[in-house]
């Protein structure tokens, strides 16, 4: 003998009845939603009664804490199905958030926790940020609930650093009753960072005070009391998410891209893996961070700044120091627009020792003449070009028409040649040269040229070459005097 399954009418009756237990009312609402009874019959008196009973359970003084939480979650679910009710339901639930709710983990079903997190996202209560952080830390596998709680948390804090510290406090209180608590917490940390990254790209939130330190503490402090994760996969998953989190933060919060402390969690991750070199599985996030640090070095370098701690991050990110040095040298080679002292620093890996006072004074005095030598070099090259063009035809004509003037003209042209050679030698001793040929089209660089007019383009015509100092390898170094392009 078989028992017929409950009908839609029976589910509607159970949803509407005052005596229906909270879990059975939840099942009845699920059946009504599955049967697509709502929202078409939302105005049915039985549906209105069920809604009223849900709200009454939220505020019932004798209701069990988990039943109150379940009723809040079910009210939100009802508002999602009957969307015109959503604003009114949110307003009716507001008094329930006057005081802190019982822990979210009292709800055993992840979907119920998701709907409770959605309810929290609608409320402005001051107690919500630490409550949401705790819910995120205690969430096991309900990733939608974690993501919803994370979005609500970031919407209620003044900056990212504050959110990270709240999460750190919440994770610091975790004491999982498992054989490997370090693995348990590490898994949750990895999932939390994944949720954070997804939300971080969508919110306008300032970085705050020392976000790099806060991110480091979020990983290091909770694990210090429980022991680091023992499983290799757990270690790799956590480290990968940590590296990608740093990448997403510096990409979306440009104010911290050049802050060496922002990368402090990277060194912790390397120690966590107990290896002298990074595993192959982490190549992708590491390469992203190498790009971030490289761009930060260029950003500071263009302002004439050399940050040794930031340069040191390349050593942390690379498995071998030789590659870090090669990357820095490559930056110097690819960016001739950087000040010469910055390029020298990138090539050497350290700031060159300052010369003694007497040597500096001598060099400063000599440098004052460099622009004049450069201008003389421009004039000498022009004169030499004119001399080469005139030499043969001028002397040939003088020999025919003014033979008495030919020796003097020959002597003048020879002296122009000698003078040009001597100016070239003087410029060479000071490592000076000209960059750009008048009339030549050249790629515009603000380091080397000043633009005539208000329409700068990528390629422009040289009106006057720049005076530059050449490096020992022959490449262009400091600019003594900018040229002019139009």
Image (cartoon, rainbow, N blue to C red):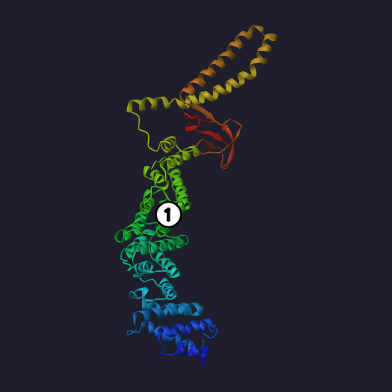
Tell me if residue 117 comes above or below residue 397 in the rendering.
Answer: below
Residue that appears at 41% across and 37% down: 345
x%, y% of residue 69? 38, 78
Tell me if residue 250 comes above or below residue 17 in the rendering.
Answer: above
Residue that appears at 46% across and 53% down: 281
x%, y% of residue 390? 64, 17
Q: Outermost residue toward the left?
A: 225
Tell me if residue 296 comes above or below residue 438 in the rendering.
Answer: below
The residue identified by callout 1 is: 243
Residue 204 or residue 322, whichever sits in front? 322
| Res. 45 visible in picture | no
Please tell me in which quadrant of the rendered image residue 402 appears: top right
Q: Badge 1 local density, few (<14 within 10 Å), some, or many (20+)?
A: many
- What SS does tag 1 mark? helix
Please tell me in which quadrant of the rendered image residue 311 appears: top left
Tell me if residue 313 comes above or below residue 357 in the rendering.
Answer: below
x%, y% of residue 44? 51, 88
Q: For this view, does 221 lie left or right of residue 232? A: left
């Amino acid at each position: 003998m078989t028992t017929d399954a409950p009908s839609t009418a029976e589910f509607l009756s159970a949803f509407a009845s005052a005596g229906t237990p909270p879990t059975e009312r939840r099942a009845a609402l699920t059946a009504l939603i599955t049967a697509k009874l709502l929202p078409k019959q939302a105005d049915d008196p039985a549906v209105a009664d069920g809604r009223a009973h849900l709200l009454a359970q939220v505020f019932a003084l004798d209701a069990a804490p988990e039943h109150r939480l379940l009723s809040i979650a079910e009210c939100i679910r009802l508002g999602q199905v009957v969307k015109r009710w959503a604003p009114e339901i949110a307003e009716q639930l507001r008094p329930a958030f006057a005081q802190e709710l019982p822990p979210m983990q009292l709800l055993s079903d992840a979907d119920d926790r998701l709907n409770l997190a959605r309810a929290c996202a609608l409320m402005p209560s001051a107690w919500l940020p630490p409550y949401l952080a705790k819910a995120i830390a205690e969430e096991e596998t309900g990733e939608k609930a974690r993501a919803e709680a994370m979005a609500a948390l970031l919407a209620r804090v003044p900056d990212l650093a504050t959110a990270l510290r709240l999460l750190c406090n919440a994770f610091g209180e975790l004491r999982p009753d498992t054989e490997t608590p370090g693995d348990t917490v590490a898994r949750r940390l990895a999932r939390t960072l994944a949720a954070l990254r997804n939300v971080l790209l969508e919110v306008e939130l300032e970085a705050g005070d020392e976000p790099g330190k806060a991110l480091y503490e979020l990983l290091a402090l909770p694990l210090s009391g429980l022991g680091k994760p023992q499983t290799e996969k757990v270690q790799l998953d956590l480290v990968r998410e940590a590296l990608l989190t740093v990448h997403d933060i510096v990409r979306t919060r440009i104010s911290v891209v050049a802050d060496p402390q922002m990368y402090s969690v990277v060194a912790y991750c390397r120690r966590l893996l107990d290896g002298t070199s990074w595993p192959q599985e982490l190549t992708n996030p590491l390469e992203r961070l190498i790009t971030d640090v490289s761009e930060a070095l260029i950003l500071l370098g263009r302002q004439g700044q050399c940050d040794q701690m930031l340069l040191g991050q390349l050593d942390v990110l690379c498995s071998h120091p030789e590659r870090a040095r090669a990357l820095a040298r490559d930056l110097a080679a690819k960016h001739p627009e950087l000040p010469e002292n910055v390029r020298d620093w990138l090539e050497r890996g350290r700031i060159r020792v300052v010369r003694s006072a007497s040597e500096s004074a001598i060099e400063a005095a000599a440098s004052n003449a460099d622009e004049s030598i450069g201008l003389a070099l421009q004039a000498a090259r022009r004169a030499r070009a004119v001399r080469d063009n005139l030499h043969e035809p001028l002397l040939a004509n003088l020999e025919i028409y003014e033979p008495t003037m030919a020796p003097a003209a020959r002597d003048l042209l020879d002296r122009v040649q000698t003078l040009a050679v001597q100016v070239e030698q003087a410029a060479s001793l000071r490592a000076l040269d000209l960059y750009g040929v008048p009339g030549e089209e050249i790629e515009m660089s603000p380091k080397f040229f000043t633009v005539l007019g208000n329409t700068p383009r990528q390629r422009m015509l040289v009106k006057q070459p720049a005076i530059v100092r050449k490096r020992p390898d022959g490449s262009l170094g400091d600019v003594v005097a900018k040229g002019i392009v139009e």
